[in-house]
């Protein structure tokens, strides 16, 4: 049993879901493990990780519309507006989604379903450089 | 330290929470490990995993009513309606809940609290056959 | 490769986010591992775990206001009111947040970003004694 780690940098462009599945798959493949567990961790509180439908781009657009309505920018409810009207909504969206994910590795491949992709979900209007830690464990 | 993996199939019947705690416990017991970590991963984007209260069935019914109100079927906000009015709501519900869970194993038993059960939460109106990967690591 | 486990008790005082980062960091440091993975698991269905912004206390207050509005106490939608008007809302808040977290360990330190803290989020109005299991794996 052994482990491997790396940090993947992702440059996001506003409120979008960036598909990191192929980057992740490539790194996992390079570690030469057959069975195990991959953990992903995003080092931010205004961008999150999500496993979502990977076939129809409308799904990602609908998801963003849903979150924009559920957690409206500039909501008078929020006192924390230091970095603008999208600051606190970004933290709330992170609480409602995931900071970390885990995906088993079976027979050399991630156990993602056919329609599952791994995404970085940016919650700030401007986008940013985001770091995702990958931790792989197995044999 | 060693690991074990399996895939558990769950047939869901519409929007319900299916308790998989005993199935999971039984498989874990069969691996003969004392301390470690169990990870569960569901290979779908319209059904999710949840740890919830296991005593009163009203909790699961209330939870379903809450999600049905929060993410209404047929919401005109959604463009992705390929598989019907419950298609996109199912993806949103997955984003708001979990695709994977982790539960430590202590002294041969899962460290679940007294009132915690492990559930597959089906988000499609019709139900489906769902695959849950179990990954156990320990000694 | 080896593992270590412990249970941390946290006494919460009503609906607040209790920062457990330093307790967790101290225990991790004591295990003497360099690289690996920490998993946290809360053994309850009315308190959850969250990684959130750790600089401005307004963020936690705003988060609580958001959840109080999204999942109102005493909502007539809920039938499960055994322990009062905050009973079912606590379960819903748990479904919307996390029961478990995972944080990689890199070069002897948890890979948390600068602004990330680890919190126990109490969802019952009165607070309670909460158990969080820590599982660390690495070398």
Image (spheres, coloured by chain):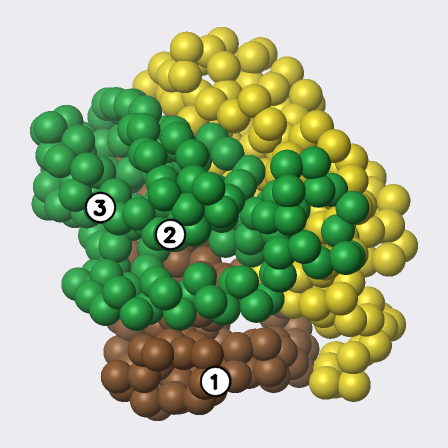
Chain colours: A brown, B yellow, C green
Asked if badges 2 and 3 are on one and the same chain, I answer yes
What is the chain identity of the residue bearing mark 1? A
> Which element carries disc 3, helix, strand or loop?
helix
- From the image, tell me which residue sits under label 1: A75
Q: Could you say which is closer to the camera, residue C88 or residue C104? A: C88
**Spatial distance from mark 2 to mark 1, Cα to Cα?**
21 Å
Lateral position of residue B98 relative to residue C14, left or right: right
> What's the residue at 62%, 78% (across, down)?
A66
Task: Give the label, 3 or 1, closer to the camera.
Answer: 1
From what the image shows, is residue C13 above or below residue A64?
Answer: above
The quadrant in which residue A85 appears is bottom left
Q: Quadrant of the N terminus of chain A?
A: top left
Q: What residue is drawn where x is 26% and y is 65%?
A: C57
Picture quarter with the C terminus of chain A: top left
Q: Is residue C94 visible?
A: yes
Quickly name the residue at label 3: C21
Upstream in the sequence, badge 2 or badge 3?
A: 2
Rendered location of residue C138, percent (x, y):
23, 32
Q: Position of residue A101 (x, y in %)?
A: 44, 52
| Classed neighbour count for the residue bearing mark 2: other residues with Cα under 10 Å, few (<14), some (14–19), many (≥20) | many
Quadrant position of residue C91: top right
Closer to viewer: mark 2 or mark 3:
2
The residue pinned by badge 2 equals C16
Q: What is the secondary structure assignment of the residue under circle 2?
A: loop
Q: Residue at x 47, y 67 (%)?
A: C65
Residue B67 percent location from the top left of the image: 72, 60
Q: Is residue B118 above or below residue C123?
A: above
Residues at marks 3 and 1 touching, judged by CB atoms closer than 8 Å? no
Which sits in the foreground, A26 or B41? Answer: B41
What's the CA distance linking mark 2 and mark 3? Answer: 15 Å
Nearest to the observer: residue C117 or residue C123 = C123
Question: Is the residue B32 above or below the residue A115 in the image?
Answer: above
């Amino acid at each position: 049993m052994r482990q491997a780690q790396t940090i993947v940098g992702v440059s996001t462009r506003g409120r979008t879901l960036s598909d990191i599945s192929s980057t992740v798959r490539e790194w996992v493949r390079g570690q030469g493990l057959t069975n195990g567990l991959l953990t992903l961790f995003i080092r931010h509180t205004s961008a999150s990780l999500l496993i979502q439908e990977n076939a129809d781009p409308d799904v990602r657009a609908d998801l963003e519309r849903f979150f924009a309505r559920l957690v409206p920018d500039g909501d008078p409810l929020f006192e924390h507006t230091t970095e603008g009207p999208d600051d606190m909504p970004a933290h709330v969206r992170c609480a409602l989604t995931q900071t970390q994910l885990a995906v088993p590795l079976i027979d050399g491949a991630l156990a993602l379903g056919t329609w599952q992709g791994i995404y970085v979900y940016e919650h700030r209007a401007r986008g940013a450089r985001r770091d995702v830690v990958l931790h792989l464990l197995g044999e």
